[in-house]
Image (spheres, helix red, strand yellow):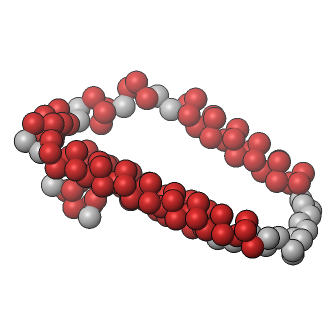
Amino acid sequence: MAGIFVLLGAEFVAITQILVYVGGILILMVFGIMLTNRLSQAKVETEVYNKFFGILISVGLFYILAKAIEMADFANMGWMKNAPSSPSSVRDLGMKIMTDYVLVFEVIGILLLLALIGAVRIAGNTREEGADAA
């Protein structure tokens, strides 16, 4: 869907949609981890066999990325200087949200806050029940 927005010339909406979906997936994973039960009896032992090679590869990749960023000439990129301005700018979108759709914007914010409070409450109840059983 974000690709369609880019093709229609609404780059800001496309990037915003991508960031919202990434944030949603991240929050889903955090709550999934938060709501799973821990294995209290089973001890999981792990050993690191290739610590030296892991550090070596990490340092090498960091060096390659640092050199690539250092060699890039961000100031003289032609496509950044000659980028056409979109007919629907971020300023226009902000003005529209904060004037015509301010009530909808506030209601959505309150609903998201209530959903977050409910999720934390559910997670808290699960932990309290587990603590009573132990």
Q: Is residue 115 visible?
A: yes
Q: Number of labelled discs?
A: 0
Left or right of 65: which side holds 95? Answer: left
Vertical arrangement, residue 27 with respect to residue 84, above or below: below
Left or right of 125: which side holds 74? Answer: left
Q: Residue at x 15, y 55 (%)?
A: 8
Q: Nearer the viewer, residue 118 or 71?
A: 118
Vertical arrangement, residue 120 with respect to residue 77, above or below: below
- The residue most toward the front is 132
Q: Residue at x 38, y 26 (%)?
A: 76
Name the quadrant of the N terminus: bottom left
- The residue most toward the top is 75
State the image quarter where residue 93 is shown.
Answer: top left
Name the quadrant of the C terminus: bottom right
Vertical arrangement, residue 129 with respect to residue 67, above or below: below
Left or right of 95: which side holds 77? Answer: right
Task: Give how far across and how far down residue 58 sits, in percent.
Answer: 75, 47
